[in-house]
Image: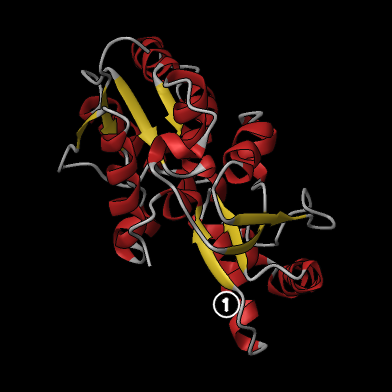
């Protein structure tokens, strides 16, 4: 990119309420890359939990608010494949029978990117040293379901991890298998979810990595909780935290 980009951050509920340090790292990395970062203060949930549970009308209210809040953004950056997929993919389904809002949803979808996707596809960054990244240790990468299957983001995050000085990426068996969180899935089908995450963290520990990295804190929260219950020392980190060398 030859010109400085202007991007607004859609921070997501989980990061806002539970992992604000991830949002800080996202902003720091973007600023280091020359991005003017904005933050609409009245933003709210994207509506995905309601939509996934069948409360279509209620989710439309939240989604309409998102359309309004980000209508003037040049770019919208989302540190979550799940929430980015909601805006990019599921809003088009949600507003399919409301032509006026569907046109707004298409406009928003066209300028919305998941964090790693924005770095690679918009900013043209495929080397983590451009972010000033430097880490010591080893990491396994979990590609979250929506990021991989809905957005088709596959190579970018791994390539960024591979270029972090001092960080060795370990192969993760069954990497593309779901961790079992699935938003409301883990609430509706807890026993199935527990078995899925048990398989996932067994593979994480077998990888020998000291850090588990993903682009979705919802997945990391689920896997991190399971690791913690087993007394594991494996740390969980969002990709933005790995790229932000100042992050603990």
Residue at (76, 66) in percent of width and height? 200
Name which residue lies at 50% across and 36% down. Answer: 116
Picture layout, residue 39 above or below residue 140: above
Left/right of residue 53 with respect to residue 129 in the rendered view: right
Residue neighbourhood size for the residue with mark 1, other residues' Cα within 10 Å, grouped as few (<14), some (14–19), many (≥20):
some
Residue 146, given in percent of the width and then of the height, sits at 62, 40
Question: In the image, residue 75 lies at what x, y percent?
Answer: 32, 22
The image shows residue 113 at horizontal and vertical percentages of 45, 28
Of residues 18 and 31, the one drawn nearer to the viewer in this rendering: 31
Image x and y of residue 85, in percent: 53, 34
In this figure, which residue is indicated by the disc labeled 1?
Answer: 225
Q: Is residue 126 above or below residue 48?
A: above
**What count of labels does the image hold?**
1
Residue at the far left in the pictured view: 41
Image quadrant holding the C terminus, namely bottom left
Q: Quadrant of residue 106?
A: top left
């Amino acid at each position: 990119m030859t010109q400085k980009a202007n991007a607004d951050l859609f921070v997501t509920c989980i990061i806002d309420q539970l992992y604000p340090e991830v949002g800080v790292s996202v902003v720091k990395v973007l600023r280091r890359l020359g991005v003017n970062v904005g933050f609409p203060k009245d933003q709210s949930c994207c509506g995905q939990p309601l939509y996934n549970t069948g409360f279509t009308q209620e989710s439309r209210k939240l989604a309409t608010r998102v359309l309004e809040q980000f209508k003037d953004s040049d770019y919208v950056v989302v540190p979550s494949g799940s929430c980015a997929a909601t805006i990019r993919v599921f809003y088009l389904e949600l507003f399919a029978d409301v032509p006026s809002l569907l046109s707004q949803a298409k406009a928003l979808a066209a300028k919305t990117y998941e964090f790693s996707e924005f770095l690679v596809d918009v900013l043209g960054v495929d080397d983590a040293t451009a972010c000033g990244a430097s880490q010591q240790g080893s990491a396994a990468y979990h590609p979250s379901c929506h990021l991989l299957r809905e957005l088709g983001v596959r190579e970018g995050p791994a390539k960024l991890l591979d270029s972090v000085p001092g960080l060795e990426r370990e192969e993760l068996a069954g990497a593309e298998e779901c961790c079992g969180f699935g938003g409301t899935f883990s609430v509706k089908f807890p026993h199935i979810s527990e078995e899925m995450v048990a398989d996932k963290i067994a593979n994480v520990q077998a990888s020998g990595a000291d850090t588990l990295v993903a682009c979705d804190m919802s997945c990391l929260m689920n896997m991190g909780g399971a690791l913690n219950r087993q007394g594991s020392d494996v740390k969980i980190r969002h990709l933005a935290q790995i790229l932000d060398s100042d992050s603990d």
